[in-house]
Amino acid sequence: MRNVPQLRFAGFEGEWDSSYLKKLASIYDGTHQTPNYTKSGVKFLSVENIKDLKATKYISEKDFDKDFKVFPEFNDILMTRIGSVGITNIIKSKEKFAYYVTLALIKPKEWIFPEFLNYSINSHKVQKEIWKRTLHVAFPNKINMNQIGEIPLKYPVLEEQEKIGELFRKIDALIEKQEGKVSKLEDFKKSMLQKIFPKKGQLVPEFRFEGFDGDWEIKKIHEIASVKTGKSDTQDSVEDGEYPFYIRSDTPVKSSKYLYDEEAVLTIGDGQIGKVFFYVNGKYDLHQRVYRIFDFTSEVDTKYFYHYFSKYFLRRAMRLSAKGTVDSVRMEMITGMEIKLPKKIEEQIKIRNILENLDTQIETEEKLLVSYKQMKKSLLQKMFV
């Protein structure tokens, strides 16, 4: 098998060279001592900081000068070596960093482009080599320092390394920008949810559409809808079934039969209680530990109810539980829950429309984010040997 990538920039040919990480970079580990943390000073990095390098802990300048003769500098790479082994980030700051033994410091040689080496470590083949050298007999997983140096890598001439590294840097910038878009939309939706429904003890929301006024009303769920559970069990699912089958999971499966043909709101009775909700309108199958809220009165818009219920039900379930978690949902947790409703259904519809539009925007941006990440994953497989 030739040392040539599947996908390559025009103008480059010939096989890549083979080597080991210890010959392409100098490798160090961080301090083994428990740090004496301070309120300010030199940022102290550990595994939990690897993704953004935003440390929340510090050590003094004095301790840094004493304990770190070798430290991360611009274009150096940090890699996790305990826990989720093999996650990397490249230093793009001139500030000082101290780091713990859970991280390995990788300083590329002058003939290795730092971004190329960083993404090479993240490629599928190198990650497999890291996994092979990781100790899995204890928790957490761990790779020894000497084994990091034995990781085999292949590399082209410096000019080709630079083109590859720059490409992936741009892809990462694209992903980061897209993550920011999703995050902003999610934050905006959270803000709208706070303003579009009345706060505790109030019957008028902070934000209101023009043309509507007056107090909202309070109804218990059993006054506005029926509540029951399904009848099917998990083994009733079939891979190529015609109908969605809602089980105790955040992802429905398939069923060859349907129990109901209706508009309803569903929530699970076990598992991620208060965090999994579905709006359905049509034929579906239902697990015996999933609740269906259906047959709403004419004064309630079902989708409005879905948004209100999915925002506030977890809070009620936690309040009615004597523990810090909720093991299962009891019928009265749902039927006795109070729902605040605008008296005019037209106002309910406007509220659900704005929330649905936000959900559609978030879903669209999330799909684009997923496509960028899949593109990066595919290129990591095709552009490295």
Image (spheres, rainbow, N blue to C red):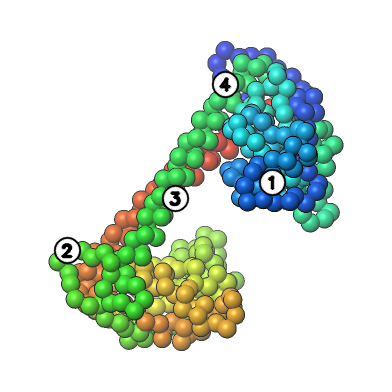
Give the Cα distance between marks 3 and 2: 28 Å
Query: What residue appears at the point 30 percent right and 66 percent down from the top-left corner?
Result: 196
Quarter location, residue 186: bottom left
**Residue 7: horizontal and vertical position, in percent?**
59, 25
On the image, numbered disc 4 is attached to which residue? 163
Foreground mark, 4 or 1?
1
Neighbourhood count class around disc 3 (C-alpha, 10 Å): few under 14, some 14–19, many 20 upward: some
First in residue order: circle 4 vs circle 1: 1
Given the image, on which type of amino acid does mark 4 rest? Answer: Lys
Instruction: Confirm or deny contact between disc 3 and disc 4 (CB under 8 A).
Output: no
Instruction: Confirm or deny contact between disc 1 and disc 3 (CB under 8 A).
Output: no
Query: What residue appears at the point 19 percent right and 76 percent down from the top-left corner?
Result: 214
**Residue 246: horizontal and vertical position, in percent?**
49, 69
Give the Cα distance between marks 4 and 1: 38 Å
On the image, numbered disc 2 is attached to which residue? 210
User: Of the numbered discs in the image, which one, if any, rests on residue 59?
Assistant: 1
- Quick one: SS at disc 2? loop
Q: Is 127 displayed left or right of 294 in the figure?
A: right
Give the Cα distance between marks 2 and 1: 55 Å
- Quick one: SS at disc 3? helix
On the image, numbered disc 3 is attached to which residue? 183
Given the image, on which type of amino acid does mark 2 rest? Answer: Glu
Image vertical order of residue 376 relative to residue 188, above or below:
above
Given the image, on which type of amino acid does mark 1 rest? Answer: Ile
- Quick one: SS at disc 1? strand
Give the Cα distance between marks 4 and 2: 55 Å
